[in-house]
Image (cartoon, rainbow, N blue to C red):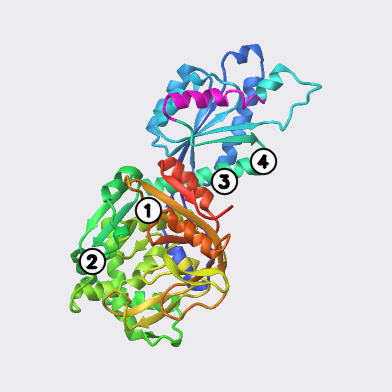
Amino acid sequence: MGRRREYLTTDSVKALLAARKPIRSGRVGVFSVGHYYYWPQFPGVREKLLEHTAYFIKQLEQQGKATIIAAEGLCDSSQRAFEVGNQFAREQLDLLFCFVATYTPSAHVLPVIQRAGVPVVLIALQASAAMDYTRATIAMQLENDNITSLPEIAGAMARANQKPVDVVVGTLRDDDRAWERIRAWCEVATVWHELKNARIGLMGHVYEGMLDMNSDPTMADAHLGMHVEHIEMDDLKARVDQVTEREAADKLALIESVFDFPDPGADPVATKATREDLIWPAQVACGMDRLVADFGLTGLAYYYRGLGGNDYERIHAAMIIGNSFLTSLGVPVAGELDLKNCIAMLIVDRFGAGGSFAEFHPVDFAEDFVLVGHDGPHHLLIADGKPALRKLSVYHGKRGSGPSVEYKLKVGPITMLGLTQTHEGKFKMVLAEGQSLPGLIPATGNTNTRGKFEPDVRTFLERWTMEGPTHHFALGVGHIADKIALLARCLGIECVLTTPK
C-alpha cells in the first residue's frame, strides 16, 4: 500500500507535490495471544477476546499508516506460535505487534518473535478502564488480564536477546496516549521500510578537509540495510548531453513557475537571476532526473571541485535547482558528499516533515536565535511562501557561479536531525526541537531560518556541539523527535535529544 505524505504547500509548489512518488508502506505483523486452558473453563471468554482483537486490528487498518498483516485467531498454544512465526517469517515484516489479549504463557509468544526476526512492540490494552468490582468474576478478570503476562514475556525475550523496542499499556478505547504511540510505531515501520530499501548514490568526493563528512558506505549498507551506489560524473554528463530541447523547455517553465526572482539586496554577490541564467541549470536538472531514474536512486550525495571551468565544473555549478526539485520530490540530495546527512534528510522526509540540507549560520544574541540554512539544494515544500532564486557571482568556498535557492522555513515548530559517527564507528543521532520565527533573513541566495531553541541559544549550541555531531543536519517542520527516537531503537542507534521537552 503506497501513501503520499501531506505537506502544507503554497500553490506554486503543488505541481511538485503531485509528482512525488507514493511512499512504500511498512509491513506490520499483528498477533493476539491467549491461553487455550481457559476456553473450556470459561465459555465465551475466547469470543470476547477475539472481538477485542478484531477491534484493535480494524483501528490499525483505518489509520492507514502501514500495511497490517494479522495472524488469524488467537495464538494460544506453543504449536500455534510456531505456525504464526513461520507465517510471519515469509511476510518480510518491518515490525511486529504482540497484542496481549489476556494472560498467556511466554511459550505462546517467543517462537513467533524468534521466527519473525523484527523489532517487537508489546501492546496491552484493557477492554475496560476498570472492572465493576461488585459484579466481578474470573471470566471478567480474564477479559481484562492484558497486563499479567507482560513481565513474563519481556523476561523471556530478554533471555533470548530480543528485548522489545517498546511496551504500550492502556485501554482499548478512549486512550489517546496509547493510540498515539501505536500510530507513531506504524509510521516508524514505514520509514524503516523506506530506509532498508533505499539506494543512495555517491558522486564525486567529500569536500576537501571536512573530516566529519567522511564515512564508510559499507556501514550504511550493513547497519541500515540500504545500498550505496557509486556513480561517476561521467554518468551525469552523458545524461545531460542527451536532454532534448523539449525536456529543457518544460523544466525551464517549471523553474519560472515555482520560484520568485527578487531584486538584489545589499550583497553585491547576489544579483537578479535572468531567464538566460536558467537555461543551463534546466538542462542539468533534466540530466539529474535521468540519472536518478536510470540508477533507481532514493537519494544522492555529491560534490565535485572542478578545474578551469571544465564540463564537470559547469555541471556541478548548475545542479542546485534540479537537486532542489529532486529533494522536494522525495529524493534527498546532499552537497559536499555528505552521505550521513543524505540519510538524515531521507528519514525526515519520510516522516512527512521535509528535511532540508542545513548548518548553523550567525547567531542573533540580541534576540536569542540562530540562523540555520545552507547554500545548495533544498526542500522546497517546507518554504515559507514562494522560494526565491538569486544569481551568485561566486559560490563561497566552491568554484563556479549561477542561480541559488533562497527561502526561510514555515513559521512554527521545527526539528533538526544530525547523523554522526562515534569513535567506534557506530552511527549516532543528534536531535533538537525548536521554533522557526518570523522575520527578515539575509538576501544572499542561501536558505536561512530564524531558529529558536530552549533554554537559550548559547546553551543549546553548547549542548549540540558536545554530542560530537557533523556540521550538517536535516531541518524539518513539526516536532518529530519522539518518532525519530523510536526509529533509532529499531536500528540500535544511540539517539540524544539536546533540547528539553
The residue labelled by disc 4 is 175
Q: Is residue 84 visible?
A: no
Taking depth in this image into account, of 420 and 321 the one nearest to the observer is 420
Cα distance between the residues tagged 3 and 1 = 33 Å
Cα distance between the residues tagged 2 and 3 = 41 Å
Taking depth in this image into account, of 88 and 262 the one nearest to the observer is 262
- Nearer to us of marks 2 and 3 is 2
Cα distance between the residues tagged 2 and 1 = 28 Å
Cα distance between the residues tagged 3 and 4 = 15 Å
Cα distance between the residues tagged 4 and 1 = 36 Å
Q: Is residue 151 magenta?
A: yes
- Nearer to us of marks 2 and 4 is 4
The residue labelled by disc 2 is 236
Q: Position of residue 434 (x, y in %)?
A: 55, 61
Instruction: Using the image, determine if residue 283 lies above or below residue 477.
Output: below
In-image side of 375 versus 440 (left or right): left
Q: Residues within 10 Å of mark 4 (few under 14, many from 20)?
A: few
The residue labelled by disc 3 is 63
